[in-house]
Image (cartoon, grey):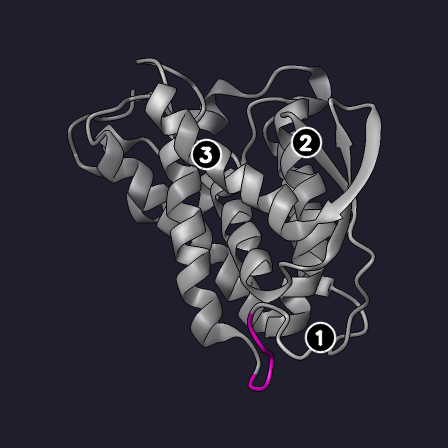
Amino acid sequence: MPIFPIHDGRTLSHVTRPYATWTIIAANIFVYFFLEGGIYGEVSFAAVYGFGLIPATYNDYFDLPADLAIAAPDWLTLFTYAFLHADFWHLLGNMVFLWVFADNIEDAFGHVRFLLFYLLCAAGAGYVFVLSDPAAQTPLVGASGAVAGVVAAYLMLHPRQWVWILVLMRIPIRLPAYWVLGFWVLFQFYSILVAQPGEQVAWWAHVGGLVTGAVLVLVMRRRGVPLFDRGA
């Protein structure tokens, strides 16, 4: 990842603590280390295939092997896949984005509506991934699609907020959010154009999360919360 957000410095106005954000981060960490077995260095094959989102299975083109007895219903994998990660760095990247940006979205939505928003972004991202390759048998895992929804909401609410980032993981600089997150958004679309067959990163899921988040922020934010930092 060419940029790594550190801190946005924006204070909360409507909630005292971002409890929903903390709960989501804790759930992802718990699932990775204890349910996926990441604490031992390698994630569980059964967890990834049983609870990841597999387009071919979702569309009834493919059945999981009988030895994967514990598996989520197909509709539920639209949500469960977002709490699984392929490795520690995959988990870390997504959780850092949530830690830096999600608290302000929770502040604008409220705890319950933010949690619903996050899950709907995960489902929207997952469904776009299913549509992009209906017969794929590789599981989709990771919070990236839901995180993309958070990124879209942040851009629409606080594009002028200054954000500290690490460039190339070593150079700290401070830029407006519309530069930092705008670059991230453009990078997702660029990656779709240059992606190679069989590439592991689910760029379409990111785009699905972005679109879902951009639509939902219009209707789910608190009454009186302006878009695009109007009045700031």
First of labels 1, 2 by sequence position: 2
Left or right of 90, for residue 116: left
* Disc 2, SS: strand
Q: Is residue 78 left or right of residue 177?
A: left
Counting other residues with Cα less than 10 Å from the Cα at mark 2, is it few (<14), some (14-19), or many (20 or more)?
some
Q: Disc 1 residue type? A: Ala
Q: In which quadrant of the rendered view does residue 191 lie?
A: top left
Q: Is residue 25 visible?
A: yes
Type of secondary structure dominating the magenta stretch: loop
Q: Residues within 10 Å of mark 3 (few under 14, many from 20)?
A: some
Which residue position is annotated with label 1?
Answer: 232
| Residue drawn 19% across the image and 26% down it | 135
Q: Name the residue tied to disc 2.
A: 3
Magenta region: 223-227
At mark 1, the secondary structure is loop
Q: Nearer the viewer, residue 28 or 201?
A: 201
The label nearer to you, 1 versus 2, is: 1
What count of labels does the image hold? 3
Based on the picture, tell me whether residue 226 belongs to the magenta stretch: yes
The amino acid at mark 3 is Gln
> What residue sits right under mark 3 in the picture?
188
User: Is tag 3's residue or tag 1's residue first in the polypeptide sequence?
Assistant: 3
How crowded pointer 1 is (Cα within 10 Å; few <14, some 14-19, many 20+) is rated as few
Residue nearer the viewer, 53 or 93: 93
Which one is in front, 172 or 36? 172
